[in-house]
Image: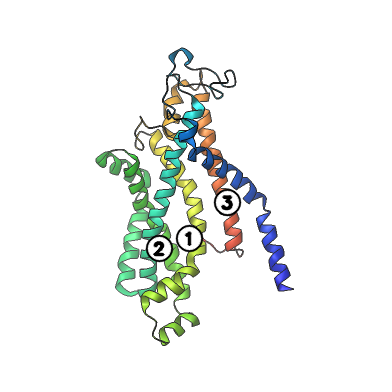
C-alpha cells in the first residue's frame, strides 16, 4: 500500500504543470543560448544602418526588429542570454560552495568557529546590497568576472545560515552519535552522513537564486555597473533601448520578456523542487 502511494505521488509530481512549464521556459531558452554560436555566428553584432529600427514581424530577416544600429534584436536577445545565464549559474555555484563549507564547519564544530563565522555573516547581511555593489564595482571596475565575484561574496551567507541550521538539527541524531561511537572521523561524518541530508534545501535555494541573480545582473548592467556595454546582455539591451521606448519599444521589450520568462521558468522549477524534496514546506525561502 505504501509503495503504491509513493508511486502515485511520484507520478503526480512529474506530471506537475509547474515542472512542464518550467522545463519549457528554461529549457527552450537554455537550448537557444547553447546553440547561439551556430545560430548567429556574428554574435548579433552585424550592423545594417539601412534597416535600423525596423519594427518586429515585418521582415523575415529580422523577426523581432532591429536596434538603433541595425542589429538583429532576436540574435542579441539569444546571445545576450549567454552572459546572463552564465552569471546566474556560476555565481550561485560559487556561493553554494563557500556557504556550504562555512555552514558545515559552524554547525558541526560550534564554539568559537561558529561565533566568528556567524557574526561575520550577520554583519554582511546588515550591509545594503546596492550600496555595496556600487562601491565594489566602482573600485574594481565592471566585467563579467567581477559581477560573479561580487555576487558570490554577497550571497554565500544565505547558504551558510541554511546549512548551519540543518546541521544543528542533525549533529546530535542517533546515526551521527553512532558514527562517532565507532570511531568515524569528523570529516567523514560531515561529508558522508550530514552533507547528503542537507542537499535538498540547498538545491531548492540554488534554483531560486539563479533566477534572482539573473535579475540582479540585469539590474546592475542597466545601471552601468555590470557587464561591459560592448558585450550583449539583457540588462545592457534594456539600458540601450530606454531612450527609444516611445519610438522603438521592441528594443527593450523583447530582452525584458526574455528575462521575465527565464526567471518565471526557474521559479516554477524551484517551487516544484520544493514540493518534491520538502513536502512539509519547512524549507526556508
Q: Is mark 1 on a helix, strand or loop?
A: helix
Q: Mark 1 to mark 2: distance in Å?
A: 8 Å
Q: Name the residue under label 1.
A: 202
- Which residue occupies 34% across, 69% down? 114
- How many dots with numbers? 3
- Which residue occupies 37% across, 48% down? 151
Label 2: how many residues lie within 10 Å, few (<14), some (14-19) or many (20+)? many
Between discs 1 and 3, the one toward the N terminus:
1
- Which residue occupies 57% across, 57% down? 273
Q: Tell me: residue 221, above or below residue 157.
A: above
Q: Name the residue under label 2.
A: 100
Q: Mark 1 to mark 3: distance in Å?
A: 14 Å
Q: What label does residue 269 carry, if any?
A: 3
- Marks 1 and 2 in Cβ contact (< 8 Å): yes
Q: Position of residue 171 (x, y in %)?
A: 44, 76
Side of 118 relative to 33 (left or right) = left
Amino acid at each position: 500500500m505504501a509503495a503504491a502511494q509513493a508511486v502515485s505521488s511520484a507520478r503526480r509530481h512529474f506530471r506537475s504543470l509547474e515542472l512542464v512549464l518550467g522545463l519549457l521556459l528554461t529549457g527552450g531558452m537554455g537550448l537557444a543560448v547553447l546553440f547561439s554560436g551556430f545560430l548567429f555566428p556574428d554574435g548579433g553584432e552585424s550592423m545594417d544602418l539601412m534597416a535600423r529600427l525596423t519594427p518586429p514581424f515585418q521582415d523575415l530577416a529580422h523577426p523581432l526588429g532591429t536596434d538603433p544600429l541595425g542589429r538583429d534584436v532576436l540574435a542579441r536577445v539569444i546571445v545576450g542570454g549567454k552572459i546572463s545565464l552564465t552569471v546566474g549559474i556560476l555565481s550561485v555555484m560559487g556561493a553554494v560552495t563557500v556557504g556550504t563549507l562555512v555552514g558545515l564547519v559552524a554547525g558541526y564544530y560550534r564554539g568559537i568557529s561558529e561565533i566568528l563565522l556567524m557574526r561575520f555573516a550577520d554583519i554582511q547581511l546588515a550591509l545594503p546590497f546596492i550600496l555595496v555593489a556600487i562601491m565594489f564595482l566602482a573600485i574594481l571596475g565592471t566585467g563579467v568576472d567581477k559581477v560573479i565575484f561580487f555576487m558570490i561574496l554577497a550571497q554565500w551567507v544565505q547558504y551558510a545560515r541554511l546549512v548551519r541550521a540543518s546541521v544543528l538539527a542533525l549533529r546530535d541524531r542517533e546515526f551521527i552519535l553512532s558514527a562517532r561511537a565507532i570511531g568515524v572521523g569528523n570529516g567523514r561524518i560531515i561529508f558522508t552522513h550530514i552533507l547528503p541530508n542537507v542537499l535538498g534545501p540547498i538545491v531548492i535555494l540554488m534554483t531560486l537564486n539563479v533566477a534572482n541573480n539573473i535579475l540582479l545582473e540585469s539590474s546592475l548592467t542597466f545601471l552601468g555597473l555590470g557587464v561591459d556595454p560592448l558585450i550583449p546582455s539583457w540588462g545592457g539591451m534594456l539600458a540601450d533601448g530606454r531612450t527609444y521606448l516611445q519610438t522603438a519599444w521592441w528594443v527593450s521589450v523583447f530582452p525584458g520578456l526574455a528575462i521575465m520568462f527565464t526567471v518565471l521558468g526557474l521559479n516554477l522549477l524551484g517551487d516544484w523542487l520544493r514540493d518534491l524534496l520538502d513536502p512539509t514546506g519547512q524549507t526556508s525561502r
